[in-house]
Image: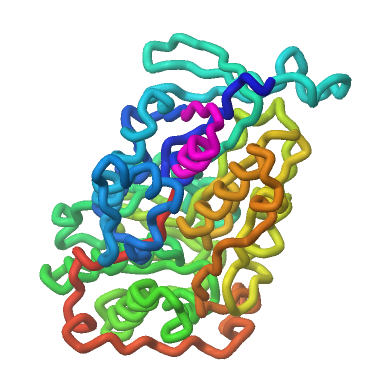
């Protein structure tokens, strides 16, 4: 199997970085990307500005691969998703050349000649990566190892609070979006509802709040499942990423000013359609009516369908890689940063198979690009036989400044720590929301 390539699934930030590390170690690698260009998922949210600065968004091996081509790393500023692609990810994919195969979907990963049940001789068999191209032609590619960096973008969570679509959610699908809006002008004068408590939901709320300030009659309602909004506004001065803190501060202001109606403890059970629009019904019977559009931004979950014939170990609650679940569980994670993870934590029962990037976090919402870059550095070192480097932690992640714990899910008792301080960032930025500065969590 030593003559076979390592197959990387996904040409997003982590997939391309993994390939760069493997190339630097003279390992043969093939990257398979479903989209027609690099980082196709990032391109779909290209209008969103990230809260990580440029130095936190590029990988070291990728920079070393790119610099001989005349590419220069950006040292300051906060790119949009589109700028991240055009100024870094697309050049990186171009530098990798024919190693990246586009418009090809991975439909399954298995061991050659053995389904999931068979144990005898399993480790001595190569992986078989099943693919289908844009014309429907299927193929198989043998690999000595597989790195799944396919992300979670393709499988957003529903609005329904129990993890399944709410009653009527499918029937109202033309009025419900699971993506951050790029243009909200057509929503002027209507009642818009955002469901969710993460950075994507916060971004959407801020974008819509500016529309509400400009256009009389525009209403914005923000529905949170938790009983408290304390953690929604971020870590303030305790957040080592200042623009992430600023995002929360702006969200606090639009709710305090009454531009956005914040409703806590609202767990969506049903959508009812009428001539007046949608009525959203909570599990406790509360209703929000006359809704013209809903943005359900409740996170993502991993699609593991293509992995059904390989042996993987995922946490039963988060669907994250079991080895890192305790570090990232939002139910129990306390104040401070999430530790960096590498090959040792990401190892699977199927030797030579790794899940990295946002997909490794499953449903957990705390993923950063820096985390993924450290993951793939370690995994590439492991696959190249450099176990000393694989075991080394070369990254200290920035503190979130946000307290975890589930103590406020059913009441207003607050989180496990004191309420976070609010970062004061200047009246001009607080009084007028600038969509060009709105920031959200980077994803794979």
Q: Residue at x 17, y 78 (%)?
A: 432
Give above or below for 196 relative to 166.
Answer: below
Considering every residue shown, the one lying at the far front of the view is 68
Left or right side of 91 for 280: right
Q: Residue at x 59, y 82 (%)?
A: 415
Q: Residue at x 27, y 66 (%)?
A: 76
Left or right side of 348 for 134: left
Residue 253 location, quadrant: bottom left
Of residues 142 and 248, which is closer to you in this image? 142
Magenta stretch, residue numbers: 17-31
Residue 158, x across and y down, in percent:
49, 49
Residue 122, x across and y down, in percent:
81, 23
Considering every residue shown, the one lying at the far top of the view is 137
Q: Is residue 336 visible?
A: yes
Left or right side of 14 for 186: left
Of residues 281 and 407, which is closer to you in this image? 407
Residue 431 location, quadrant: bottom left
Residue 63, x across and y down, in percent:
38, 49
Of residues 421 and 342, which is closer to you in this image? 342
Q: Residue at x 50, y 63 (%)?
A: 282
Report the coloring of the rendering: rainbow
Residue 1, x across and y down, in percent:
69, 20
Q: Is residue 26 magenta?
A: yes
Q: Is residue 279 magenta?
A: no
Give above or below for 9 relative to 295.
Answer: above
């Amino acid at each position: 199997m030593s003559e076979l390539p390592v197959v990387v699934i996904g040409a997003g930030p982590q997939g391309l970085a993994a390939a760069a590390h493997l190339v630097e170690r003279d390992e043969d690698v093939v990257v398979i990307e479903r989209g027609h260009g690099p980082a196709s998922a990032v391109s779909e949210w290209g209008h969103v500005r990230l809260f990580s600065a440029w130095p936190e968004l590029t990988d070291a091996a990728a920079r070393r691969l790119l610099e001989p081509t005349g590419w220069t790393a950006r040292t300051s500023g906060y790119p949009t998703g589109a700028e991240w692609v055009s100024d870094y990810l697309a050049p990186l994919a171009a530098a990798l050349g024919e190693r990246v195969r586009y418009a090809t979907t991975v439909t399954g990963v298995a061991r050659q000649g053995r389904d999931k049940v068979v144990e005898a001789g399993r480790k001595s068999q190569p992986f078989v990566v099943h693919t289908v191209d844009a014309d429907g032609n299927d193929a198989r590619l043998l690999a000595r190892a597989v790195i799944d960096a396919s992300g979670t973008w393709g499988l957003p969570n529903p609005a329904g609070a129990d993890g399944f679509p709410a009653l009527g959610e499918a029937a109202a699908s033309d009025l419900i979006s699971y993506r951050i809006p790029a243009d909200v002008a057509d929503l002027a004068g209507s009642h818009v509802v955002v469901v969710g408590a993460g950075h994507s939901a916060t971004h959407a709320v801020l974008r819509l709040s500016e529309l509400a300030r400009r256009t009389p009659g525009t209403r914005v309602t923000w529905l949170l499942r938790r009983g408290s909004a304390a953690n929604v506004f971020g870590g303030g001065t305790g957040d080592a990423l200042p623009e992430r803190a600023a995002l929360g501060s702006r969200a606090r202001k639009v709710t305090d000013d009454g531009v956005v109606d914040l409703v806590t403890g609202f767990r969506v059970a049903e959508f009812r359609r009428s001539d007046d629009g949608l009525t959203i019904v909570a599990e406790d019977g509360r209703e929000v009516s006359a809704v013209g559009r809903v943005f359900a931004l409740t996170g993502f979950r991993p699609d593991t369908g293509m992995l059904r014939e390989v042996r993987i170990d995922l946490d039963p609650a988060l669907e994250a890689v079991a080895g890192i679940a305790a570090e990232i569980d939002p139910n129990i994670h306390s104040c401070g940063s999430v530790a960096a993870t590498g090959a040792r934590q990401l190892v699977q029962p199927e030797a030579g198979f790794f899940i990295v990037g946002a997909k490794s976090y499953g449903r957990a919402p705390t993923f950063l690009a820096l985390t993924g870059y450290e993951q793939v550095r370690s995994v590439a070192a492991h696959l190249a036989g450099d176990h000393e480097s694989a075991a080394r932690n070369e990254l200290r992640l920035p503190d979130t400044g946000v307290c975890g714990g589930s103590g406020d899910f059913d009441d207003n008792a607050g989180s496990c720590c004191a309420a976070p301080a609010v970062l004061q960032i200047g009246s001009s930025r607080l009084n007028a929301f600038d969509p060009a500065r709105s920031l959200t969590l980077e994803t794979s």
